[in-house]
Amino acid sequence: MVFSSNPLSLSVPEPAFESWLRDSGYLEVLDHRSSSTATTSSDSTATTTAATITTSTFTITGVLFSHVLTLLSLFTLNPFSKLTTLDFSAPTPSWTYGFIGSCDSYSFPSTPAQARLRVHENVKRYARNYATLFILFFASSLYRMPLALVGLISCLALWDAFKFCSDRWGLDQYPVFRQCLVRIAQCVAAVILMYSNVQMAMFCALSISYAGMILHAAFRKLTPAKQPSHGRNM
């Protein structure tokens, strides 16, 4: 759905129009309006300051400074504040068209507010894609650290053996004894995980996946929630 700048500008104030777009779910329109406003503002600034080299230098410095502030603001927000369990139960968006998109699907966020809008919405839309990437990064970390992989498999085998013995010997009838065995198994598992550096593999996977998620969500333009069909017209 295509909107002009504000088709109701004579009767509806600009903040009210943006609030209606947000409440109606047209977040991609807000994203496009923010980019268009920033482009228009930068073009007019460049036109008015082209007469003097000093003013142009200050303009370029101001643009670079605003970009740095926008990037820094990405690491001060909580990208999971609007994430719900329903976002993980939704179908996984297409990796090629939906998640990656084309070169035109990316642009630098013009303001921290636009970056925040993109991050919150894209994290909700591509939650399953980001979770899949984290699993892949974690598997890659374990592949690069064989000792961590052995430690993780040993912990899983320990708990499977504990469950098997508990069912076979009927430890549910002795809750106090079973609880003591659980605490002992937890301590053994913690020692194995720490000795095999599983926490380091987890930290590497979390760091890489989090940074990739933040950058992708901030630079990925918002698109309509329901993508148009690409079927061939008969």
Image (tube, grey):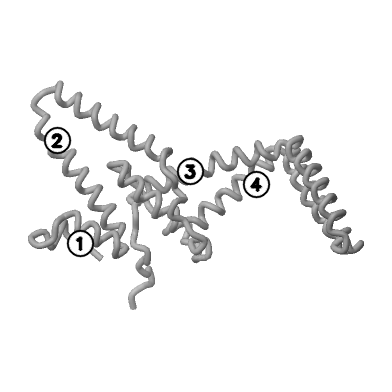
Disc 4 from disc 1: Cα separation = 45 Å
- Name the one closer to the observer, 221 or 127: 127
Please indicate, yes or no, whether residue 161 appears anywhere in the rendered image.
Answer: no
Relative horizontal placement of residue 200, taking residue 122 as reference (left or right)? right
Would you say the residues marked 4 and 1 are in contact, meaning their CB atoms lie under 8 Å apart? no
Amino acid type of disc 3? Gly
User: Mark 3, residues whose alpha carbon is within 10 Å: few (<14), some, or many (≥20)?
Assistant: some
Give the secondary structure at mark 4. helix
Amino acid type of disc 1? Phe
Q: Horizontal and vertical percent for residue 185?
A: 81, 47
Relative horizontal placement of residue 166, taking residue 9 as reference (left or right)? right
Disc 4 from disc 3: Cα separation = 16 Å
Residue 212 badge = 3
Disc 2 target residue: 45
Q: Horizontal and vertical percent for residue 148?
A: 73, 40
Q: Quadrant of the C terminus?
A: bottom left
Residue at 78% from the left image edge and 40% from the top image edge: 192
Relative horizontal placement of residue 133, taking residue 143 as reference (left or right)? left
Residue at 34% from the left image edge and 32% from the top image edge: 68
Q: Horizontal and vertical percent for residue 136?
A: 60, 49
Q: Is residue 70 above or below residue 23?
A: above
Disc 1 target residue: 3
Residue 215 badge = none
- Name the one closer to the observer, 185 or 3: 185
Disc 4 target residue: 139
Give the secondary structure at mark 2. helix
